[in-house]
Amino acid sequence: MAKGGDFIALKIREVGNHYDIPVIQSPALTRAIYHHTEIGDEIPQGLFKVVAQLLAYVYQLRNARTGAPRPESMPNLDVPDEFQWDGR
């Protein structure tokens, strides 16, 4: 996982694409992590479940590269209300 905004976010995506790392978009989770952590911080406990769901999906995608069944769809990543970011 990487953290950055604007130009840094663009560079993160470019590096990921170069190394064939899938980019998964979850704006609500991205905003929650971005606005509730600093670089080097642990994921807040209230986001453990949603991050675990995302990681499980990522591992399923990785396993699909080696012949395992590809997951049908990304899980619904429900970010708890206290971590929602509305821009204020």
Image (spheres, rainbow, N blue to C red):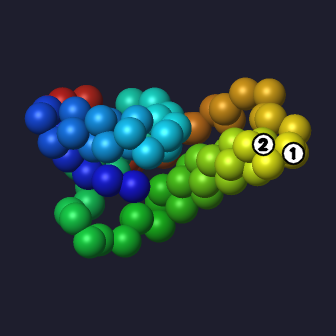
Residue type highlighted by circle 2? Ala
The location of residue 28, given as percent across then percent down, is: 40, 34
**Residue at the image position 49 percent from the left and 43 percent from the top:** 21
Label 1 sits on a secondary structure element that is: loop
Q: Can residue 72 be seen in this view?
A: yes
Which of 6/67 is in front? Answer: 67
- Res 37 quadrant in image: bottom left
- For residue 52, side relative to residue 5 (left or right): right
Is 21 displayed left or right of 37 in the figure?
right
Mark 1–mark 2 CB contact (< 8 Å): yes
Q: Considering only vertical position in the picture, is 56 above or below 38?
A: above
* Closer-to-camera residue (26/47): 26
Please state the horizontal and vertical placement of residue 3, each as a whole percent of the image.
26, 51
**Going by the image, does 85 lie left or right of 38?**
right
- Residue type, label 1: Ala
Could you tell me which secondary element the residue under label 2 belongs to? helix
Report the residue at 58% width, 38% height from top: 77
Is the C terminus in the top left, top right, bottom left or bottom right quadrant?
Answer: top left
Q: Which residue lies furthest to the front in this view?
A: 18
